[in-house]
Amino acid sequence: MADILDYCSELAEIRFKSGQIMLPEGERLGKLLVLIEGQVEVIRERTQVTHVDEPGSIFGEMAVLLDMPHSATVKALSEVRAYEIPDALTFLEAQPEMSLHIATMLARRLYYTTSYLVDLQQQASGKRQDLDLVDQILSTLVDPTETGKSGK
């Protein structure tokens, strides 16, 4: 598959200053942004979800594909250059390779999220002793009197 930036090379490039909101949570803009260079953070409900600095990273795809407001804010952490795809659905219909790339990226996110959810559920039900052991060690570090209790 060709580089994502190659598909966007004819598009308008926009710049963001450090601290500037690139995509606001709760708004419906219908556009995609493709990172050329810089560092951004994704924030959902005032919590940083991730930090991104990989050229070719795409932002706004969930809102566009689901026809809903942005579920997170994308904010520049440095000077940022990005391609803007204002009418994202039309662009994706004309660029099936780009659509496939986004589908693959979303499938990968879903896989890791589902795996994480299963790990949390197993820990909560006591099936993940390795994670329970971490909790026991942390408890011991916080309250050293816990170590002698089970051995008495």
Image (cartoon, grey):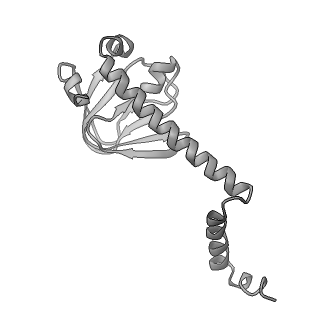
The picture quadrant where one finds residue 143 is bottom right
Q: What residue sits 32% from the left and 23% below the top?
A: 98
Q: Is residue 143 above or below residue 12?
A: below
The picture quadrant where one finds residue 17 is top left
Q: Is residue 105 above or below residue 118?
A: above
Q: Quadrant of the N terminus?
A: top left
The picture quadrant where one finds residue 14 is top left
Q: Residue furthest right?
A: 152
Decide which of 39, 10 is in the foreground and name it: 10
Q: Quadrant of the C terminus?
A: bottom right
Instruction: Say if residue 46 shows up in the picture.
Output: no
Q: Is residue 111 left or right of residue 81?
A: right
Number of marks present in the image shown: 0
Q: Is residue 142 left or right of residue 91?
A: right
Q: What residue sits 43% from the left and 40% below the top?
A: 42
Image coords of residue 139 (percent x, y): 67, 74
Q: Is residue 16 above or below residue 28?
A: below
Image coords of residue 49 (percent x, y): 48, 45
Q: Is residue 10 above or below residue 34?
A: above
Q: What residue sits 35% from the left and 31% below the top?
A: 58
Image coords of residue 101 (percent x, y): 35, 28
Image coords of residue 71 (percent x, y): 52, 30
Instruction: Say if residue 92 shows up in the picture.
Output: yes
Q: Is residue 76 left or right of residue 36?
A: right
